[in-house]
Image (cartoon, rainbow, N blue to C red):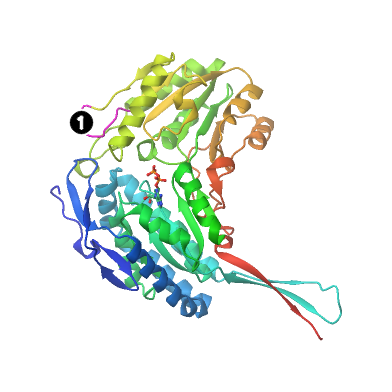
Amino acid sequence: DGDRSIETSLLRNGHYIDGHWRGSSETYPVYNPATGSVVAEVAKGGRAEAQEAVDAAAKAFPAWRALTAKERSSRMRRWGELMLVHREALAELLSREQGKPLAEARGEVAYAASFLEWFAEEAKRAYGDVIPSPSPHAKILVVREPIGVVAAITPWNFPLAMITRKAAPALAAGCTMVLKPSEETPLSAFALAVLAELAEIPAGVFNIVSGDAIAIGTVLTGSSIVRKLSFTGSTRTGKLLARQCSDTLKKLSLELGGNAPFIVFDDADIDAAVRGAIASKFRNTGQTCVCVNRFYVQNGIYKAFTQALVDAVSRLRVGDALAGDFEQGPLINRAALIKVQEHVADAVVKGARVLMGGKPHALGGTFFEPTVLVDATHGMLIAQEETFGPVAACFRFDSEEEVVTAANGTPYGLAAYFYTRDIARSWRVAGALESGMVGINEGIISTEVAPFGGVKESGLGREGSKYGIDEYMELKYLMLGGL
Ligand code: ADP
């Protein structure tokens, strides 16, 4: 595939189970979305491989949890450092199977490694508590214990970061893991396991099974050994997996879809708002769960903002990440392209105007033109569903009250953004938005030090930050009597 060669030491094409690289009888191709060519043929695993991986994780759990926090921590830190040592090779592999611009892929490698560093530190700080006792003859202690074997199911849009965001807190807590990465982007996951092995993460602590999502998912969700599922992906699949987990009452972390509003008030700094808009809307070619889906722009600033947005969007260069310096890549696959086309067509039929873009890109394949639509309204698909593509749809509004109601008018509540220079309004609007995360005069909010997650149908639980490790631990209360 292409002219450049991937650092072959990081290339694997099968499962990683109990410290061994394994094949399956069936294989399937992983494509480069920029060129349509095959990056690699990889193993297509199913129920048997998933069950073996669960058993391996169960077997590895007692010894891993018994290590001191410092011992777990130093291996995890090493794992993160190795990611940075191999940053260029990981970034190239990531771009090749996912399509994102190289600069973004390098950023993702660092972001992914940051979770290992952060949770390596947090591993040492999983403190318990002593509670003042109601009796002079007893003490009350609270200790925190790892929940056990964890299953993780991750998407293709951040093929490295969505894995370390789960694996790092899980391993820090003392849990072991079975990961099923997205079938679209398993190679980055395999590369991560190569580095885990080099970092001396013991066999069975971090396992990967890739292939038939439904078969593997059925085993992971149905197993009574697996005590927790951590999933990032669509709301539809998240609900299905939650139902599948109900028989064994697993603890759940679900990071699901969003429909982020981005509100520009009349008193906003337009240049800052446009920079934030580009960063948030067009990152990963519009394919992040915190990407803006709806731009609400107040009447007094509507023309100026939309014009400045068009100017900025027209400077975005589109192309194959490995063929030059670009800000936009292809969409992940045909289905993604069709969805974006449908959203634009539906908006136009219902009265939106296309200020720029609006159609598949001349590069062909799954490339789509960076697009700005104005005069969008609530009844359009683009207002109701996550578009997951490079389309900025602008809605007009009059009052703060009206825009907060509109912003909250979806089943989702992951990220929201707004721009204003009025401090009182900042507090009012931040408080009124039904959203797990709010960017105030900021378009990029993801960082390992802050809790990432949603409300409403955007999910359950938080990832990253000092809170992230709680998702992988149980509290155990001890009453020590007879004193
Ligand atoms: P997207 O539409 O963005 O691909 P999905 O929610 O379908 O989002 O996919 C996210 C992850 O969930 C991927 O790893 C995918 O393979 C997995 N997945 C999808 N459907 C199922 C299922 N029925 N059981 C287990 N995993 C699934």
Give the x, y percent position of residue 321: 25, 42
Residue type beneath disc 1: Leu
Taking the view exactly as shown, the residue that stands out farthest to the left is: 3
Judge from the rendering whether residue 354 lies leftward or rightward of residue 136; answer left or right. Answer: left
Res. 114 in view: no
Give the x, y percent position of residue 328: 31, 36
Q: Main secondary structure of the magenta part?
A: loop
Q: Is the residue 440 above or below the residue 89 in the image?
A: above
Q: Is the residue 77 above or below the residue 107 in the image?
A: below
Judge from the rendering whether residue 246 lies leftward or rightward of residue 372; answer left or right. Answer: right
Residue, disc 1: 363
Q: Is residue 221 part of the magenta span, yes or no? A: no
Which residues, given as a range, are shown in magenta? 362-370
Mark 1 burial class by Cα count in 10 Å: few <14, some 14-19, many 20+: some
Q: Image point 43% across, 68% down: which residue?
A: 77
Between 330 and 239, the one nearer to me in the picture: 239
Taking the view exactly as shown, the residue that stands out farthest to the top is: 351
In which quarter of the view is residue 187 placed? bottom left
Q: Image point 84% across, 82% down: which residue?
A: 137
Q: Secondary structure at mark 1?
A: loop
Give the x, y percent position of residue 454: 56, 45
